[in-house]
Amino acid sequence: MAREFFDKLMEYIKANKGKTFGAIIGFIVAILVLTIGFFKTLFIVLCTWLGYYLGSKSDNKENIKELLEKILQIGKKD
């Protein structure tokens, strides 16, 4: 019986990856808000997003140093 339930659950997850992922992320964010507070959770989410963004640039073989210089305007004199 438990095996059948697990198999059906896995089928559902495979068929609804986006919904499952969204539910898990929502659950994690809710737990973080309740345990450490809204602003600390927001900070974690922003840092995670920044890491994901920079990682995706690295995966696409883009130069991260040039991107950071562009964003932070390092070395530019007015």
Image: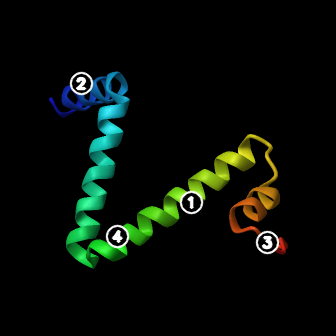
Q: Is residue 9 above or below residue 44?
A: above
Could you say which disc has been placed on residue 41 in the image?
4
Q: Earlier in the sequence, mark 1 or mark 3?
A: 1
| Residue underneath mark 3 | 74
User: Considering depth in this image, is 25 or 61 the residue closer to the camera?
Assistant: 61
Eye-nearest disc, 3 or 4: 3
N-terminal label among 3 and 4 = 4
Q: CA distance from mark 3 to mark 4?
A: 29 Å
Residue named by callout 1: 50
- What is the C-alpha distance between the residues marked 1 and 3? 18 Å
Nearest to the observer: residue 5 or residue 68:
68
The image shows residue 51, relative to residue 14, as above or below, that is: below
**Residue 51 position in % (x across, y down):** 59, 59
Which secondary structure lies at badge 2?
helix
Rendered residue at 34%/70% (across/down): 41
- Which of the marked residues, 2 or 1, is nearer the chain's N terminus? 2
| Disc 3 residue type (three-letter) | Ile
- Disc number lying in front (1 or 3): 3
Q: The N terminus is located in which quarter?
A: top left
- In this rendering, position of residue 58 left or right of residue 44: right
- Report the amino acid beneath label 2: Lys
> Disc 2 designates what residue?
8
Q: Earlier in the sequence, mark 1 or mark 4?
A: 4
Q: Residue at x 81, y 57 (%)?
A: 66
Disc 4 from disc 2: Cα separation:
33 Å
Q: Are marks 2 and 1 in contact (CB under 8 Å)?
A: no
Q: Tell me whether the residue at label 1 lies in contact with that at label 4, contact meaning CB atoms closer than 8 angstroms.
A: no
